[in-house]
């Protein structure tokens, strides 16, 4: 991208309570490898100091700058303006999360879904220790966990997921991806409990409710595949049940009957 001007349209919160959010256009002076986050800073500096957005690391590591740019989720600091032809870029907050102001969203519902899968490691008695201790895992088991590690909790996968908006109890891609890492952790004591959580009715059908559209996988800035994690959780569950088809059949029957 050479120096020039691009129109950046930002969805702004209403000035008064009860009003409607509306796009506001700003002319941004561009330079090579300018990011959407750079553009937002320029708007804040030169056009409107009240523009609200979040960021921290500016390196794609903290996950706080997630927004929707031209209809696709992304990290503002890693999304370059030169990706978009046509001289106009729109920026809006992520889906399914309450807007605090402008592009800043309340992440609490995202973490509520995360908490629903018991996302913390629960050591088996044999591996629990009163002091900090490195607990290694067998290499063969570890290979199932590796591709699902590195999540930065940005919320992008949830915003891009078509099931989350329809199913309030569905844990969402990030939570299920986290569940997979623990289910495959031989040192964790809550494997069965967690598998029951992510496959049950209380989780809105959990892994059975996923449509396997790969939206989350396509959007994840860390190149994780929550879709693959969900598929693997299904296999883990089916591999352990005496009647493995009971849960998915019950879920499908409930959906077909409209309950
Ligand atoms: S899985 Fe990817 S998109 Fe989802 S929260 Fe983690 S890093 Fe973000
Ligand atoms: S500012 Fe940290 S990921 Fe963008």
Image (tube, rainbow, N blue to C red):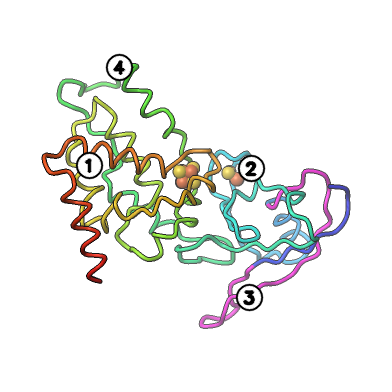
Q: Which residue is mark 4?
A: 138
Q: Which residue is mark 1?
A: 194
Residue at 21% across, 64% down: 254
For marks 2 and 3 on the same chain, the one whose residue lies earlier in the sequence: 3
Residue at 63% across, 75% down: 22
Q: Which residue is mark 2?
A: 58
Residue at 79% across, 60% down: 86
Image depth: mark 4 or mark 2 in front: 4
- Specify whether tag 2 is near ligand 2 (CB below 8 Å): yes
Residue 22's mark? 3
Question: With 184 as the anchor, is 102 left or right in this view?
Answer: right
Q: Is residue 28 magenta?
A: yes
Q: Secondary structure at mark 3?
A: strand
Q: Secondary structure at mark 2?
A: loop
**Residue 153 visible (yes or no):** no
Task: Give the CA distance from mark 2 to mark 1.
Answer: 35 Å
Q: Against 137, is 120 above or below? A: below
Figure quadrant of residue 244: top left
Mark 2, residues whose alpha carbon is within 10 Å: few (<14), some, or many (≥20)? some
Q: Position of residue 13 (x, y in %)?
A: 58, 72
Residue at 28% across, 51% down: 116
Q: Along the line of sight, which residue is nearer the eye, 179 or 238?
A: 238
For marks 4 and 2 on the same chain, the one whose residue lies earlier in the sequence: 2
Region of the chain picked out in magenta, as a range? 11-36
Task: Give the CA distance from mark 2 to mark 3.
Answer: 27 Å
Q: Against 149, is 248 above or below? A: below
């Amino acid at each position: 991208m050479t120096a020039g001007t691009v129109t950046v349209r930002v969805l702004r919160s209403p000035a008064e309570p009860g009003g409607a959010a509306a796009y506001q256009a700003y002319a941004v002076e561009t330079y090579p490898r300018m990011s959407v986050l750079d553009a937002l800073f320029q708007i804040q500096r030169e056009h409107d100091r009240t523009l609200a957005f979040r960021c921290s690391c500016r390196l794609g590591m903290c996950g706080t700058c997630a927004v929707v740019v031209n209809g696709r989720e992304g990290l503002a600091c890693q999304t370059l303006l030169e990706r978009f032809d046509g001289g106009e870029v729109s920026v809006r907050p992520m889906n399914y999360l309450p807007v605090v102001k402008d592009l800043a969203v309340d992440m609490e519902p995202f973490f509520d879904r995360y908490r629903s899968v018991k996302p913390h490691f629960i050591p088996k008695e044999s591996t629990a220790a009163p002091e900090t201790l490195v607990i290694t895992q067998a290499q063969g088991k570890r290979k199932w966990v590796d591709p699902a590690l590195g999540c930065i909790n940005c919320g992008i996968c949830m915003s891009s997921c078509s099931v989350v908006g329809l199913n309030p109890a569905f844990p969402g891609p990030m939570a299920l991806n986290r569940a997979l890492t623990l289910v495959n952790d031989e040192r964790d004591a809550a494997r069965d409990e967690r598998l029951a959580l992510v496959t049950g009715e209380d989780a809105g059908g959990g892994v059975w409710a996923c449509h396997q559209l790969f939206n989350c996988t396509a959007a994840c800035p860390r190149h994780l595949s929550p879709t693959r994690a969900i598929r693997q959780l299904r296999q883990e569950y089916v591999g352990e049940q005496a009647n493995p088809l009971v849960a998915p059949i019950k879920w499908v029957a409930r959906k077909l009957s409209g309950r």
